[in-house]
Amino acid sequence: MSPTAQHLVIMGVAGSGKTTVANLLSKRLGWIAAEADEFHPAANIAKMSAGVPLDDDDRWPWLHAIRDWMGIQEANSRSTIVTCSALKRTYRNVLAQAPGAVTFVHLDGDRELLAERMKTRSGHFMPPSLLPSQLNTLEPLSADEAGLKIEITNTPTEIVDAILYHLGFAAA
């Protein structure tokens, strides 16, 4: 029997560095990575692009698609890294249903740093005006959820080193 696939969900609000960290983790671990934004239907992207926050009805099909993708990867004995805001525990509960071991990595930072990052990035449909909505929706990881919180004030490489250390993938 092959070992169970592992899934790292890199979570947090917009501007927290999910994509950068996921890409670095993918290179370091050799695991397949996916961007949750790729799973959004066009209607969700249009809504966010217009500055309208998504509601739960918008998110359920998106979350199920991400969960199902992780399940497909697990069926093929592949561990994954996926970015996903995963703002509410109920959203994380859907993702945690994926076969394999699902661990959440919450990239956390203060409002000012996040807003500054959002203002300086290009090519993303999420406007900085939606940051307050995301922060108001965010439910931090609970002690009984598989995961850890990492502050985003360090460099991306230092953040990845800390994640790998805390998950037991790297020496001190």
Image (cartoon, rainbow, N blue to C red):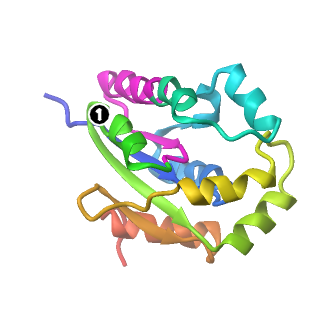
Spot occupied by residue 15 in the image (x, y as percentages of width and height): 69, 58
Task: Residue at 45%, 49% (x, y): give it.
Answer: 88
Q: Nearer the viewer, residue 153 or 172?
A: 153
On the image, which quarter does residue 49 sit in?
A: top right
In the image, is residue 70 part of the stretch drawn in magenta?
yes
The N terminus sits in image quarter: top left
Q: Which residue is mark 1?
A: 97
Q: Nearer the viewer, residue 111 or 28?
A: 111
On the image, which quarter does residue 43 sit in?
A: top right
Task: Residue at 74%, 37% (x, y): give it.
Answer: 48
The C terminus sits in image quarter: bottom left
In this picture, residue 3 sits left or right of residue 149: left
In the image, is residue 106 part of the stretch drawn in magenta?
no
Mark 1 lies on a secondary structure that is loop
Spot occupied by residue 93 in the image (x, y as percentages of width and height): 33, 41
Q: Amino acid at mark 1?
A: Gln
Task: Residue at 74%, 39% (x, y): give it.
Answer: 52
Task: Residue at 58%, 59% (x, y): give it.
Answer: 136
Spot occupied by residue 37 in the image (x, y as percentages of width and height): 64, 34
Q: Which residues are magenta?
A: 64-86
